[in-house]
Image (cartoon, grey):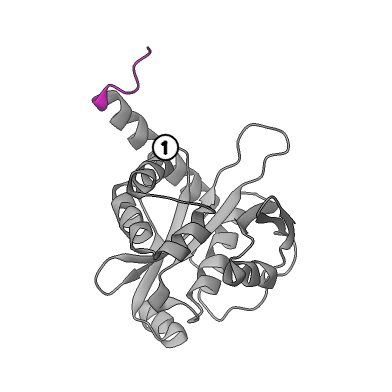
Amino acid sequence: MYDALIADLTGSKGTIRSLINQELPLLRDHLLRLDAESRRDRFNGYADEGFIDRYAMKCGGDGTIIVAFFGEDGSVHAAAELHQPDLSTDSLPEIAFSVEAHLRRKGIGSILFKQLMEVARSLGYENLRITTGAQNQAMRALANKFGAHLTFRQGESTGTIDLNQEAPRVDAPTIEIPAGAASALIDFNQACWNLFLRMSGLGRAA
């Protein structure tokens, strides 16, 4: 039923759900499939295969929550990422998005945006930060749709989203991820990453 509704809304058959740590290679493969311009927009600069490999691995250890669109082939073709804030007093959780070219302008980005905002609210966050390249018009339009106030600085647009404001209507079911489950997912990702570091020897003190 849920998959049928997604297909009806977007015209593309698939599933939207959160990734677990073992599925991070699917995120890596998705990012590698982005065309050169899309990859530059996503990372606001050049990102080669090695960078993306390291980035996907890092997401497994820093508590990043990823909600993704899975195609009928089981691959990830769009992703929304919620990166946890660091320990500084003015730090905010940050969000990022990527959609492969053949799925753009189908509403998938809006659905993912809504789902990620719901996850952030369930974790008790009140504000989110979004950063995108100044030339990324699609991402800027999507951010503005959800209430972001973007400012331009040093080649990029940065803004915040107030989660206490009413979100725009997006005709899509909400993925329910209770705060406890989201926190458990963060802890699980970090535990898997620490185990990997111990097994590889990278976690040993120098």
Question: Which image quadrant for residue 202?
Answer: top left
- Name the foreground residue: 154 vs 90: 154
**In magenta stretch: residue 125:** no
Q: Quadrant of the N terminus?
A: bottom left
**Residue, x 34% and y 45% (percent of image)?**
53
Q: Which residues are magenta?
A: 199-206
Does residue 34 sit above or below 22 in this rendering? below
Does residue 3 sit above or below 129 in this rendering? below
Does residue 157 sit above or below 13 in this rendering? above
> Does 186 sit left or right of 144 as displayed?
left
- Name the foreground residue: 195 vs 43: 43
Q: Give the total number of marks visible in the rendering.
A: 1
Indicate the position of residue 30 as horizontal and vertical percent values: 35, 61
Q: As shown in the figure, which amino acid type bears the numbered disc 1?
A: Gly
Indicate the position of residue 48 as horizontal and vertical percent values: 37, 49
**Residue, x 38% and y 46% (percent of image)?**
56
Decide: few, some or many residues near mark 1? Use Cα within 10 Å; few <14, some 14-19, many ≥20: many
Which type of secondary structure does the marked residue at label 1 adopt?
Answer: loop
Magenta region, mostly helix, strand or loop? loop
Indicate the position of residue 63 as horizontal and vertical percent values: 47, 42
**Residue, x 60% and y 35% (percent of image)?**
86
- Name the foreground residue: 20 vs 47: 47
Question: Which image quadrant for residue 75?
Answer: bottom left
Indicate the position of residue 28 as horizontal and vertical percent values: 34, 53
Q: Which residue is mark 1?
A: 61
